[in-house]
Image (cartoon, rainbow, N blue to C red):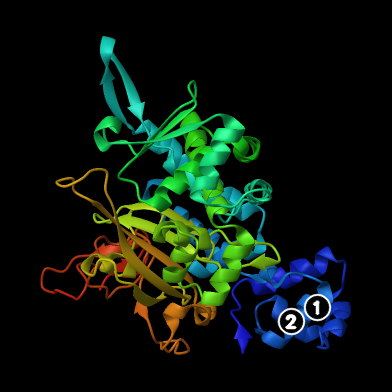
Amino acid sequence: MAIRRALLGSKVRRLRQERNLTQTAMAARLGISASYLNLIEHDQRPLTVGLLLKLGQTLGIDLRELSDDGERRLAATLGEAFSDPELGGQGVEADEVRRLVASAPNAAPVIARLYRAWRLAREDAAAVSIDLPGGRSQKVALPTEEARDFFEARANHFPGLEQAAETMLADMRPGHRELEQRLARRHGVTVEVASVAALAGARRRYDPQSRHLVLSEILPRPSRSFHLAYQLGLLEAREAIEAAVQSARLTTAESGNLVRVGLANYFAGAVLMPYGPFLASARETRYDLAILTRRFDVSFEQAAHRLATLQRPGDSGVPFFFVRADVAGNVRKRFSAAGFHFSRFGGACARFILYETFSSPGMIRTQVARMPDGSRFFCFARTIETTVGGYGSPPSRFAISLGCDIARAAELVYADGLDLGQEEAGTDIGPGCRLCERTDCPQRAFPPLHHRLLVDEDVKGVSPYAFARHGAPSA
């Protein structure tokens, strides 16, 4: 068996050079010839499992250092940048982008950050203006993308907050009553459960002056516990939260506030689902969310989100991506620790299993997804519902999906009975229509950015659009 070759050669070369080893010296340690090692470093020969294990032992490295998940995400981002028509993009070949990432590991991320900064600046310049009293106007620009970048760049794992949660749990149990008692005893915070009418539709409200926390009666018990832990995060993990925010060099106050909320939510999850016990339970149950939600008294979304954060070096779980979308197809939340690329601008792929769950509410749906670059992911998804009122108040319905590289799928109970070994098995999906090169997709909504649109009034194909790469001759 051979490990996927993409970008591994350059990583082997970098690790060798960091240890000041010649190809001859390193080849001798691996028990291969120097010429064969040279071919590996130039992606001309595969890195077999045996060699990979020997490499880890010889160099004393964590094998996750050879994972190409981050490089795949970076290559996809650069592919989007080089295809942007507003920058005069003509579409750079995928192989050329991968070579750039491999040969310039320090410069390539800078290019990606420059592109993101340009997009943010352009969006801000084109933001909608609203009229304010006195004839003034103000531009409206959402900083959500900057906050998303913050969490994704850190693989949605924060050791400082994990440590803060474990410190707090050293002298208490993560139960609802214990959380409420700690708020009262340590911080003088009183907790009240109020009617829907009293809160005017809000789910929680905290008054820092009176130290009074009010929770809506409509919240289920797991959600009430989560809000208690969230409040403790703002009070007891403030130093760790601020340290993380300051390290990010965010550009707007709104971005900082979004990140603070996200980090306090992260802390709450770490309190209700402590890292060690939760990871042990996940492995024992083979990531069965039906059992995990009951064992830790949490919601499906809370448990699913926590699974996507278990990336402690030396003791990590399956690297998952996490995504939540609404019935209109808007992606509300996303994190990727599995190398799955979400299109930064525009919607997700209509063939992604996430959207099919709305036709079977509450049921787990599974999918083997095959991306245009040949990478495959195992995905599972289901819907959830939330409400802010009683009878007559329409519920909000969302879809939640988790996914991992196909190589880790056998560790999940949801993959039982599926043939995961066939390369041809699965559903062809993409990062989004604007970046997808598949020519035969019947659900394509837009032509790809870096292709030339071909219009023939006499031909109707499977896809709504026919297209050719820029520079290709016309039919």
Q: Residue at x 66, y 59 (%)?
A: 104
393 on left or right of 149: left
Q: Considering depth in this image, is 371 or 61 the residue closer to the camera? A: 61
Q: Residues within 10 Å of mark 1 (few under 14, many from 20)?
A: few
Q: Real-space Cα distance between discs 2 and 1?
A: 6 Å
Q: Residue at x 32, y 42 (%)?
A: 217
- Picture coordinates of residue 219, whole percent (x, y): 34, 46
Examine the rendering and report whether any part of residue 91 can be seen. no
The residue that mark 1 highlights is: 57
- Picture coordinates of residue 65, whole percent (x, y): 69, 67
Examine the rendering and report whether any part of residue 21 can be seen. yes
Q: Residues within 10 Å of mark 2 (few under 14, many from 20)?
A: some
Q: Considering depth in this image, is 333 or 294 the residue closer to the camera? A: 294
Q: Residue at x 51, y 82 (%)?
A: 410
- Picture coordinates of residue 337, whole percent (x, y): 54, 62
The disc labelled 2 sits on which kind of residue?
A: Leu
Q: Quadrant of residue 282?
A: bottom right
Which mark is drawn over residue 53? 2
Mark 1 lies on a secondary structure that is helix
| Mark 2 in CB contact with mark 1 (< 8 angstroms) | yes
87 on left or right of 171: left
Question: Is 371 located above or below residue 231 in the figure?
Answer: below
Of the 4 image quadrants, the one containing the N terminus is: bottom right
Q: Considering depth in this image, is 207 or 99 the residue closer to the camera? A: 207
Of all residues shown, which one is farthest toward the top? 134
3 on left or right of 122: right
Question: Is 341 located above or below residue 110 in the figure?
Answer: below
Of the 4 image quadrants, the one containing the C terminus is: bottom left
Question: Is 432 located above or below residue 189 in the figure?
Answer: below
